Every structure is written in C-alpha cells, then in structure tokens.
Image (cartoon, rainbow, N blue to C red):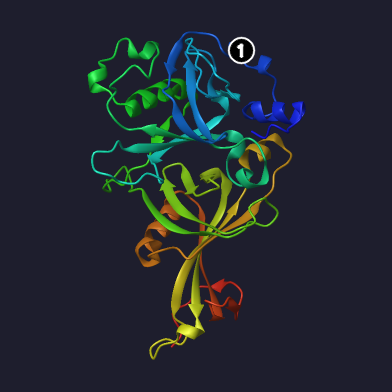
Amino acid sequence: MDPNLDDEARRQWNMQYLLGKDLSDFRGFGGGEYTLISPQVEFIAPFAGWGHLEIKGGSGGMRLCSGPGDALGIPDTGADDLFLLPWDHVEQVVIVPDPSSKVVQGADDMLRVFIIPTGATGASAVTKQYPQIVQFKWPNRRVIDSSIRGTMLEMRDLQKETYFSILRTALDEELGPLGKGVLVYTQHAKTVSKPPLFNCSGTLSPVMGTFLSEKSKGSLLFLPSGIIWLADTVLYLPFNSLNSLHLLFIRDAASATDDERYPVVSMGLVLSVTEPFYEAQGHGASTKTVHFTDIEDFSSVEVSIQNYSLAHGINFMKLEQTFYDYAQGQMMTGFMPFADPAV
C-alpha cells in the first residue's frame, strides 16, 4: 500500500470488501473459534507479498492479513494491512493451476486462488477501483507440518489431507449455506450431465471508459458459472453480466491465396458486459464492450465457444471484419454478419 495515502484513502483501501457498509452491519464478524489459519502464502491482490488468511466459524466472513504475524501469537513484525471480507460479498471462489509456476520435477505444485467479490463481477473489475479480486498462491501438496492450523484440523487425518483439500473444505462449509461453493478448474471428459471445461489464449484490447488502457495477453477459462480472464488484470464474467458473445472472424486481403481472396486469418471474442452488482443497487452501473483478439488455435475452440454460449443462454452471433492488411491494422470494413469465404 502507498504509505503516502491519507487516512480516508487508507480506510477505503482496508474496508473495500464491505462495499460501503459499516462493520456493525455484519452480525458476529470476528467472533467464534478459528476454523482455519493458513500458512504464509504469496498474495498478488489486494496486496503484493506474504500474508495469510483466517476463517472463524460463524463469524460471517474471513480476514486477509499481510505481514508475518498471525492470530495465535507469532510475533508481528509489522503487518501492513488487514482486510475483512464478508461471505455475503463473495460471488465465487475459483481455483486453477498457478499460471506463473514452472513445472519442475520434484517441486510442489502450486495453485492460484481467486476470491471474486460481488462488487467486482462483470465490467466492475475495470470500471471501479474497489473492491479488487483477491488472488493468492496456494500449495497443492500433503500437509507435512503445523504451518496450517484451526479447529477443522483436529478431527481429520492429516496424512490423508492436502493443503488444497483443507482450504476447499473450509470455504465450502462457509459458502454452502449461501448456495455457493469453490469451483476448481480442470479439463475433464464430457459426460451427459457435465460439459467439458476448456480454455484458450488471446489478447485483451483496451476497454473504453475504464482504467484498462493497454493490451494484455492472457487466458480465458470457460467455467460452469461464467468466464474468467487471467492476466495482469483479472476479469470474472458470470452469465448474468453477459448481454452477448460474438465471434469475430478477421479476413485479410494481404493474405490472399489462389483459393481465397479474403481468407480468415484470426478470430476474436466481442462481449457486451454489464455490472450486475451495481445494476441491482440501481446506480453506478455501465455496459462495456470487451474485445479479445487473436485467439490462439481458434479453429479448435470455435465450436466449443459457440456451444458454450448456446448452452448457457448467451446471445450469440458470428461476425466478420475485413482488412486490407491485418498486420498493419488497415481496416477495409466494419463488423458484418459472417459469410462463407469469398473466392
């Protein structure tokens, strides 16, 4: 956190997950026994560096703490920030393989945990300064020491547990009564009741009227509850934030062949995205066009994206745009309905 922030700015920073409410509005917050105290883990947001999380049974929320200290008396040599996150303000928890981890034989697998606040869904993640999507790394290995603690561990056989299984259980127990839970991203085989999850890589264009002013490369993960974009700026787009999803096919005159005058050389996604939380509040909401370009290996995911959109009731259309020279950004036409390749 910027040490030059004044008291009011610091208060807004620390209280961002209360979404404008007072702490007294949350009955019992901070009470109860510690269900789980995590080991020191590396946070990406809302702060960068080492910290831990604390869950108390029946307390109504969790605490995110930066610095080396914890609730059980380990000396605190200077924690910078403490964040209170009510369960009512958690939209979704998503756990994926950590995108920054390198696969090294014998090394611990790492996961990336995303806790998405209700106030950061849809376009709100790039139109509002707060709240930020919580991100931290989490080990995916057997519990071999006492770095993770809490009452939920007392009746469990830790030799059969992993750090991942303990975290997932603790979060599911708190979110379950709210009709929510932890979503773990895996690519599994298609079944009658469970369509396959899939992902693709691409580039996110700047979004007009937001603080997202530069292109960024990343990955799109298509989940049972919506789409998550993993890059420097994370977006979580639940179905209730998606007005439409259009596949945009790029034709390029500079790539003409004997068979095609304007061959398709690239594909993008054009999404109309709302702000569900602020729409429900009746103020502060906007709709943004979010454009992902140059989807890698697009021919292999085109049908999957179309089927995903139709299965979840998202308004879907195929569009095309023609360039004199796509590499140089020389446009010939605007967006048009997709047609068979011209010859």
Camera-side residue of 49 and 315: 49
Residue 298 lies, with reference to residue 279, above or below; the image says below
Would you name the residue on which mark 1 appears?
Answer: 27
Residue 19 is situated, as x and y percent measured from the top left of the image, at 66, 29
Camera-side residue of 237 and 167: 167
Residue 168 is situated, as x and y percent measured from the top left of the image, at 38, 27
Q: Quadrant of the N terminus?
A: top right
Q: Quadrant of the C terminus?
A: bottom left
Displayed quadrant of residue 157:
top left
Left or right placement of residue 14 versus residue 136 in this view:
right
Residue under the point 50% across and 84% down: 253
Residue 267 is situated, as x and y percent measured from the top left of the image, at 47, 67
Camera-side residue of 282 and 334: 334
Q: Secondary structure at mark 1?
A: loop
Residue under the point 61% across and 43% down: 125
Residue 219 is situated, as x and y percent measured from the top left of the image, at 44, 53
Displayed quadrant of residue 113:
top left
Q: Residues within 10 Å of mark 1 (few under 14, many from 20)?
A: few
Amino acid type at image mark 1? Arg
Left or right placement of residue 119 versus residue 216 in this view:
right
